[in-house]
Image: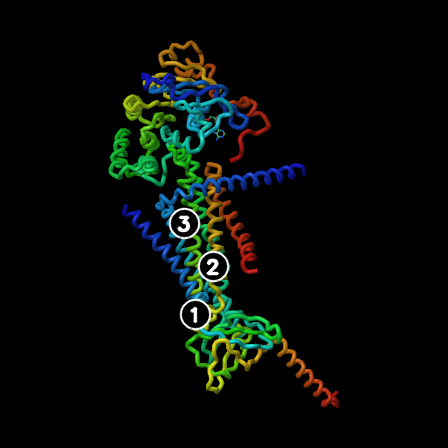
Amino acid sequence: MIEWLRLFGEQTLAATARLGRGHMFLLRVLLGLPGLLRRPGLVINQIYATGVLSLLIIAVSGLFVGMVLGLQGYNTLVSFGAEQSLGVLVALSLTRELGPVVSALLFSGRAGSALTAEIGLMKATEQLSGMEMMAVDPERRIVAPRLLGGMIALPLLAAIFTLVGVFGGYFVGTVLLGVDSGAFWSQMQAQVSFTEDVVNGVIKSLVFGFVVTWTAVFEGVDCTPTSEGVSRATTRTVVHSSLAVLGLDFILTALMFD
Amino acid sequence: MATDTGGRTNDCVVEIENLHFSRGTRQIFAGVNISIRRGEVAAIMGPSGTGKTTLLRLIGGQLRPDAGRIRIDGVDVHTLKRRALYQLRKRMGMLFQSGALFTHLNCFENVAFPLREHTRLSQALIRHLVLIKLEAVGLRGAHALYPAELSGGMARRVALARALALDPMVVMYDEPFSGQDPISMGILVRLIRLLNDALGLTSIVVSHDVAETAEIADRVHVISAGKVVESGSPQALRASSSEWVQQFLNALPDGPVPFHYPGPSLEEDLLGHRGAGAAL
Amino acid sequence: MQNSRLLETGVGLFVLLGLGALLILALKVSNISAFQQTQGYDVIAQFQNIGGLKVRAPVTLAGVPVGRVENIAVDPKTFEARVVLTISDKYANLPQDTSASIYTAGLLGEQYIGLQPGGMDEVLKPGDEIMLTQSAVVLEQLIGQFLYSTAAGTSKSNTDGGQEP
Ligand SMILES: Nc1ncnc2c1ncn2[C@@H]1O[C@H](COP(=O)(O)OP(=O)(O)OP(=O)(O)O)[C@@H](O)[C@H]1O
Ligand SMILES: [Mg+2]
């Protein structure tokens, strides 16, 4: 019993310490961001690694999610004779929730885990130490461009996901199930608000991009520099950032669409 | 070897005073004093696990001592602000024991890395400088290979070229000779001496190769059990009466130097019920 | 160098693609076009009950969108709903006696305002009020009426068919 209590306390303390380290780390990295203005090439490389390479999985997932929405939405709406509103249902679900959230989850698995593994292995093979001894601060040279690159890439990916999803829903709804295409678009346009739905979705994906990338780079830098440590850190990145995305989504939704 | 530079009264580049450092409960240094003069090649020797790598990291400012001071060119490394520390590090080169090459860059880019980060030289000039450094370590022909395609010894030589890329004031070599065949070892030994004299560097060499190190070092510092047990020229060391130094230099199996990491005796571990070996 | 050119091109394409997707989302999926189409004239209509009508709901004429609901408020004197409609300048020749009704698209769909042009020669001018209005059909009322009438019907049939066992 006492042992359980002790373990619990130990875990709590470790988690708190970790949270503190993560914030201090973030602060130092953010201080390094202005320096990137002089070296846009570093950020471009990272947008490539996190964004361009995630494009395929994002587009394909977006298509399928949109198609499923079209199918399920149709089946539900048609029983109320409201299948004309299919466009609204598909577009609202995608812009508000599924676009930002699902692309953030995929991003965490595709790009976040890769970031953690890359930085963790650089740490394990002393590359980060070596860089420090060459008077190059790894937090500015390695971490900062990755953070910025991820923050730029995810909102773009989410926009692509959403758009592809809308077209997927359109395809299933109008081409396969025979909803009138004019009604699909016009109802959608009448109901989807730019400021409330599209902009809020973009804000969400900005927040998610920041949180996922931050988690990923921090886990990489903070990992135990062994192969086991790196693999654990990679798992932690996916688990923690996914949970953070879902939790934050709830909070943001509550704030935005009250 | 030590040449007096510009009327400096204190011609020590690296001064270590009363250094204490511990990892967890294990004390690694308990009052180490070493001073390294400008222009000399200093060797640091000692049994495996005595903290030679740790000492280099302390000098480079990557670790903080518990007590004591390390001064480089007159400034205390551990009181420096971040920016000043990074300025200082530009004048230090370090060859890591593992090489620590960037695996996503090829040899050429690895050596060019510090130049690209810290200078605004033209592409042509960088190319020129990098190829010269690679030529010096005999790997110009391998400049397009990635670290994964190099042998351990080759990787270390590339790392050596990289450590020298910025023409530093102090170069620290962590076991530069391990993994080298006799020929490249001979070349490396002479290269370290040559670079040191030609460029006016100060070199700190950590090595286990007694004969090679003795060949080029001006002074040898032998560390054991957290203290410097002997300092002096290689000749003086050979003539030392210390049983300890004799055992180390002549590689005798029996003597005061422990081969084993401190722990309970073998019998105790084997017969005792508390299993020491953790399950994999 | 060749390699990094390729990479930069890829990133450029990606960023364009992402921004393009956002643009299409703004223009095609959402109602941003409503922001531009605000040039028009306002007329007022008073309804007893607007049901679920919302600001920015479409205003149609013969099924064709001709404007939007600009504002909804309660008239402090009559306690009726005072709805401001913005009608596009293209339809500046609506007769004075045009009537406005609130309809529902589909059974549970969105509510919108339908205009029925009258026959007068004078046209509606900005700020004019549409006098003939028909309130929204509120489902609960409808159901209430329906239940009432069926209840009345069944009680009648009960009295009529009293002799049955
Ligand atoms: N990260 C660490 N955490 C805890 N202890 C460490 C760590 N790194 C090194 N040590 C301990 O510090 C001691 C000195 O290590 P160090 O790497 O400096 O040895 P060394 O003299 O360079 O040995 P070698 O000649 O084998 O390279 C070792 O006993 C080791 O157990
Ligand atoms: Mg070592």
Q: Amino acid at mark 1?
A: Gln
> Quarter-wise, where is residue B76 in the image?
top left
Is residue B217 or residue C128 the one in the foreground? Answer: C128
Q: Can residue C34 be seen from the camera position used here?
A: yes
Label placed on residue A199: 2
**Label 2: few (<14), some (14–19) or many (≥20) C-alpha neighbours in 10 Å:** some
Q: Disc 3 on helix, strand or loop?
A: helix
Work out how far the residue at label 2 is from the one at label 1, CA to CA, in angstroms.
20 Å
Q: Are marks 2 and 1 on the same chain?
A: no
Q: Residue at x 49, y 52 (%)?
A: A207
Q: Chain of mark 3?
A: A
User: If the image is split into quadrants, where does the N terminus of chain B sit?
Assistant: top left
Residue A108, image x and y in percent? 47, 50
Q: Amino acid at mark 3?
A: Thr
Work out how far the residue at label 3 is from the one at label 1, CA to CA, in angstroms.
39 Å
Q: Residue at x 48, y 42 (%)?
A: A26
Q: Which residue is mark 3?
A: A50
Q: Which residue is mark 1?
A: C37
